[in-house]
Image (tube, rainbow, N blue to C red):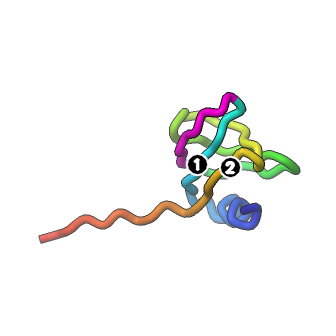
Amino acid sequence: MRRLLSKSLESGVKLEMIYLSDKMDVTQRTIKVLALGESSFKAFCYLRRKQRFFKFVNILSLGVPKKKFSRGA
């Protein structure tokens, strides 16, 4: 997981994350990693439209978004 976050930080690639908040709410978010710390990281959250801090232990799933294909004529 840390490796994927580091690669995202270096390349600027957006990630999709399923996150469990401290209030036990589960959300799916698209993020762009801005900085990594020891137990948390800072990212721009496209769901909330602002920078947020996320704890590593609260990440349920993390990955690169799947590309959406449209059928052309």
Q: Quadrant of residue 51?
A: top right
Residue at the farthest top position = 23
Which of the two discs, 2 and 1, labels the residue nearer the N terminus? 1
Residue depicted at x 70% and y 60%: 5
Q: Is residue 28 magenta?
A: yes
Name the amino acid type tagged 1. Ile
Residue at the farthest left position = 73
Residue to which mark 1 is pinned: 18
**Disc 1: CA contacts within 10 A as few (<14), some (14-19) or many (>=20):** some
Most common secondary structure along the magenta stretch: strand
Q: Is residue 49 left or right of residue 53?
A: left
The x, y position of residue 73, in whole percent, is: 11, 71
Q: Is 56 placed above or below 20 here?
A: below
Residue at the farthest bottom position = 73
Q: Is 63 placed above or below 55 here?
A: below
Cα distance between the residues tagged 2 and 1: 6 Å
Callout 1: helix, strand or loop?
strand
Residue depicted at x 72% and y 62%: 1
The x, y position of residue 60, in whole percent, is: 65, 51
Residue nearer the viewer, 64 or 73: 64
The answer to whether the residue labelled 2 contacts the one labelled 1, judged by CB atoms less than 8 Å apart, is yes
Residue depicted at x 25% and y 65%: 70
Name the amino acid type tagged 2. Ile
- Which numbered disc covers residue 59? 2
Which residues are drawn in magenta? Answer: 23-31
